[in-house]
Image (cartoon, rainbow, N blue to C red):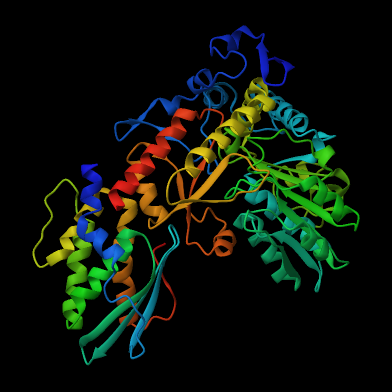
Amino acid sequence: MDELRELYQEMILDHHKNPRNFHGMDAASHAAEGYNPLCGDKVTVYLQLDRDTIKDISFEGSGCAICTASTSVMTELLQGKTLSEAEALFGRFRALVTSDPGEKPDQAGLGKLVIFAGVREYPIRIKCATLPWHTMQAALEDKSETVSTE
Amino acid sequence: MTAHLLKKGTIVRTNPATEQHGHSSPYDVFAIRKDFPILRQKVYGKPLIYLDNAATAQKPQVVIDTLRRYYERTNSNVHRGVHALSQRATEEFENTREKIRDFIDASDTREIVFVRGTTEGINLIAVSYGDSHVSAGDEVVVSEMEHHSNIVPWQLLCERKGAHLKVIPMNDDGELLIDEYAKLLTPKTKIVSLVYVSNSLGTINPVKQMIEMAHKKGICVVIDGAQAAPHLAVSVRELDCDFYVFSSHKMYGPMGVGVVYGKQELLEKMPPYQGGGDMIKSVTFAKTIYNTLPFKFEAGTPNVGDVLGLGAVVDYLQHIGYPAIAEHERDLLEYATARLSTVDGIRLIGTAKDKLGVVSFVLDGVHPHDLGTIVDREGIAIRTGHHCTQPIMQHYNLPATSRASFGIYNTRDEVDALVASIDKVKEVFK
């Protein structure tokens, strides 16, 4: 049970039940859809850019708790960030969830993203956590095809 | 092995070699469990509870031993060598073909073609029979509850030929609408391809009646028996289907082997599916003469070891007896349905009157993938996802379901453990 609590932390469950920035965006300058065919997670990420700053970011879709919470937290953290800051945060997040679960995670610069460290114990679930970030990246690159985890 | 069925579900075994397994009448699930070495392990420190049988079933010791014996003593190529091993391999291989003929009650071994599995079998039929019988404007009929493997090969055929795929709808219980089916059978319909037992919903379709309806209009019928094979004794002659396809691995046999049954008069007229060795009588650069049935459809070296493993599992299942298996699994299904129905927030997906082996469900507020992860930590293997039946998910407007599917070695205690693990899920997500 403790291990499961490590994965399903209170903050993750809270973001799952009450996702932040969970709506469409008429003024979006960029958008992309992400899909995990393994479990059916589907998220659409919307961004509104002001030159190289993310003025607004939101999402829609349905997914598992890990995916929904990860998307919700991402949209919180990326509000007002520059593109290079967003890219760097994604890099650190990816490093976190793919790091050796036996080692203490490097928390530097991650903020509340550390709540996803528990995913490391569940390799099959890592994609649930990273799908929104890949989708955000695809939106910024104006990729038209759906981002797939497979 | 021999088994005598005295009455439904009562089996007396007379072969001393199998007595050591300790099966006793009428159905000793604990003795059967001992035949499956994989079930002895612990997962995350908990005894493995394997409820993903509809994806693939575990293998009894007799199958594992057959494979080992084949590779230790017999391994050799079939139908070619004059040497002792080749002759032995050929004999055992062809004996298994006869065993399979008997197993599905076909009239002739020429009607039994070994393939890699159900998917390859359906592709064989869609290409070989389909390409030579379907033209532009024709129609192929499948149902809403087909596995992707019984949709995509027909879509490919329709694309090649400019034909159209028609779909028999189902109701919310997961039962096909027979009246709608009747309307789909028109002079344009060339093939009906139907799943016998749904892997996602457990529905047993009234295939005998549906075959009859199609035959009245002269339409060829393919039956996907992948999920039926581990649960139901099948007589292709009684069903009168034109083709019947199933896989070994879902019926406790090795992976990588399946069977296509086809009526001889149809197979005779069909062109080969693949070209190569073994499927020819003579080859010159000017002309190749194809081999006779069933070899015309078995290009290349067959999967001899796994075919023998399939033969071993047919013996094993017949030894337990399909009526006894059906009774055991019906009990499990009824018990699981009753137990899960009482869990607050659970909705069962697939509530057909006639079903077997599968309980699909969703839990309010919890994505199946989260449920699957938590249940897994209790050592319980279930399947979460779309089960390769995305049209079914679309019917219910769900991204996925959780599915527990039962086999000959599952117990009521395991169902209880599943229900208890769902309480844990609710605790995490409360």
The percent coordinates of residue A150 (x first, y second) are 42, 62
* Up-down relation of residue B366 to residue B378 (above or below): below
* Up-down relation of residue B414 to residue B189 (above or below): above
What residue do we see at 72% from left, 42% from top?
Answer: B278
Pick whichever, A11 or B353, lies toward us. Answer: B353
- Tell me if B154 is positioned left or right of B210 in this view: left
What residue do we see at 25% from left, 84% from top?
Answer: A56
* Up-down relation of residue A11 to residue B121 (above or below): below
The percent coordinates of residue B343 (x first, y second) are 44, 44
- Tell me if B208 is positioned left or right of B18 in this view: right
Residue A71 visible: yes
Hey, which quadrant is residue B99 in on the image? top right
The percent coordinates of residue A84 (x first, y second) are 18, 80
The percent coordinates of residue B215 (x first, y second) are 88, 53
* Up-down relation of residue B287 to residue B87 (above or below): below
Number of marks in the rendered image: 0
Pick whichever, B23 or B342, lies toward us. Answer: B342
Hey, which quadrant is residue B1 in on the image? top right
- Tell me if B156 is positioned left or right of A91 in this view: right
